[in-house]
Amino acid sequence: MGSHGRTDFPRTPEEIHEDYEKRKTGLIRALTEDVDEFYNACNPEKENLCLYGMRDETWQVGPPAEEVPPELPEPCLGINFARDGMQQRDWLALVAVHSDSWLLAVAFFYAVKLDAQGRGRLFKMINAQPTLFEIVTNRKSITTGATVQPPFKRQKPLFWPDDHKWYLVEIQSVNPKAKQAKIVYASGEFEDVDLEEIVRDGHMALL
């Protein structure tokens, strides 16, 4: 994937933020408007695939860069392998989390030569907008950033052996004495789970 659509390196906080927003726009399209196309592109039968946000506000799915080290930080590798093991909405949310991390990595790769004030200004501009995860899970709107649901703090994939699928859940509260936790799914549905059983059978993984 090489240059990821790069023509020249952005240098100022404003230029880096513009690059960030353009790449983010492409990723938003992949995870919201173009979901079917994106889903089909992530065939688990293919080799390791990554989701790239491009500087022309488009997205691409492809293998990682061949050069080592790559020209820019690389997105999460192998997103296609998890596609069929999760509910689609949970898989999209998981890809969004990793894509948010990649966007920040690219932005601060460019920002390495900025001073503390410049990096602070860049982070403030980035942080003023909702994350991909918030947009994909409908916790914030794309245009206004208004909160739709309370922000979650502890995201964890939870495996249910009955249907052999992973679900992205939030731990709302824990009762150590009763060894129970209240979780909420991406759909907004709540459930109480037995922590002893979850830990014993390895059904929960840290995101």
Image (tube, grey):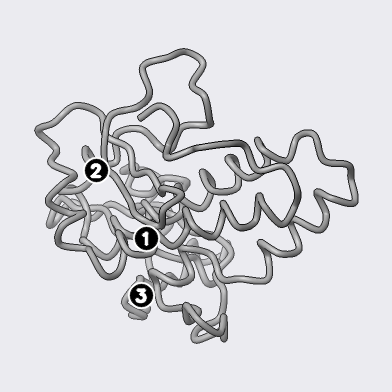
Give yes or no for contact between labels 3 and 1 (Cβ–Cβ under 8 Å).
no
- Mark 3 or 1: in front is 1
Q: Residues within 10 Å of mark 2 (few under 14, many from 20)?
A: some
Q: Amino acid at mark 2?
A: Ala
Expressed as whole percent of the image width and height from the top left, the position of residue 175 reads: 56, 68
Question: How far apart are the two marked residues, 2 and 3, measured between alpha carbons?
Answer: 24 Å
User: Depth check: 61 or 12 in front?
Assistant: 12
Residue 93, numbered circle? 1
Residue 44, quarter of picture: top left
The secondary element bearing badge 1 is classed as helix
In this picture, is 96 found above or below 207?
below
The secondary element bearing badge 2 is classed as helix
Q: Amino acid at mark 3?
A: Glu
Residue 173, quarter of picture: bottom right
Expressed as whole percent of the image width and height from the top left, the position of residue 21 reads: 54, 60
In this picture, is 97 found above or below 146?
above
Residue 76, quarter of picture: top left
**Residue at x 38% of width, y 69% of height:** 136
Residue 191, numbered circle? 3
Q: Amino acid at mark 1?
A: Ala
The secondary element bearing badge 3 is classed as strand
Residue 82, numbered circle? 2
Question: How far apart are the two marked residues, 3 and 1, measured between alpha carbons?
Answer: 19 Å
Residue 136, numbered circle? none
**Residue at x 21% of width, y 60% of height:** 87
Q: Residues within 10 Å of mark 1 (few under 14, many from 20)?
A: many
Expressed as whole percent of the image width and height from the top left, the position of residue 36 reads: 15, 62
Chain-order first, disc 1 or disc 2: 2
In this picture, is 154 found above or below 67?
below
* Residue furthest front as drawn: 7
